[in-house]
Image (tube, helix red, strand yellow):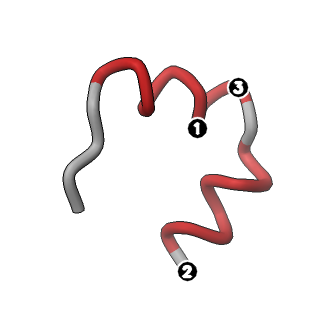
């Protein structure tokens, strides 16, 4: 799982997408 710093910020801003990616 290569997550860039910018990607992490996006995931924090969009918890829904983060949940789908993590799950």
- Asked whether the beta carbons under mark 1 and mark 3 sit within 8 Å of each other, the answer is yes
Residue that appears at 66% across and 70% down: 20
Task: Mark 1: give few (<14), some (14-19) or many (20+) Cα within 10 Å.
Answer: some
Does dot 1 land on a helix, a strand or a loop?
helix
Residue that appears at 49% across and 69% down: 22
Task: Mark 2: give few (<14), some (14-19) or many (20+) Cα within 10 Å.
Answer: few
Residue 16 quadrant = bottom right
Above or below 11: residue 16: below
Q: Residue furthest left?
A: 2
Q: Residue furthest bottom?
A: 23
Can you give x and y, in whole percent of width and height, for residue 14 in the image? 74, 37
Can you give x and y, in whole percent of width and height, for residue 13 in the image? 70, 25
User: In the rendering, which numbered label is found on residue 13?
Assistant: 3
Q: Which residue is mark 1?
A: 11
Can you give x and y, in whole percent of width and height, for residue 2 in the image? 20, 51
Q: Tell me the CA gap for discs 2 and 1.
A: 13 Å
Q: Which residue is mark 2?
A: 23
- Asked whether the beta carbons under mark 2 and mark 1 sit within 8 Å of each other, the answer is no
Q: Earlier in the sequence, mark 3 or mark 2?
A: 3
Residue that appears at 30% across and 21% down: 5
Q: How many marks?
A: 3
Does dot 2 land on a helix, a strand or a loop?
loop
């Amino acid at each position: 799982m290569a997550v860039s710093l910018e990607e992490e910020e996006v995931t924090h801003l969009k918890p829904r997408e983060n949940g789908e990616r993590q799950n």
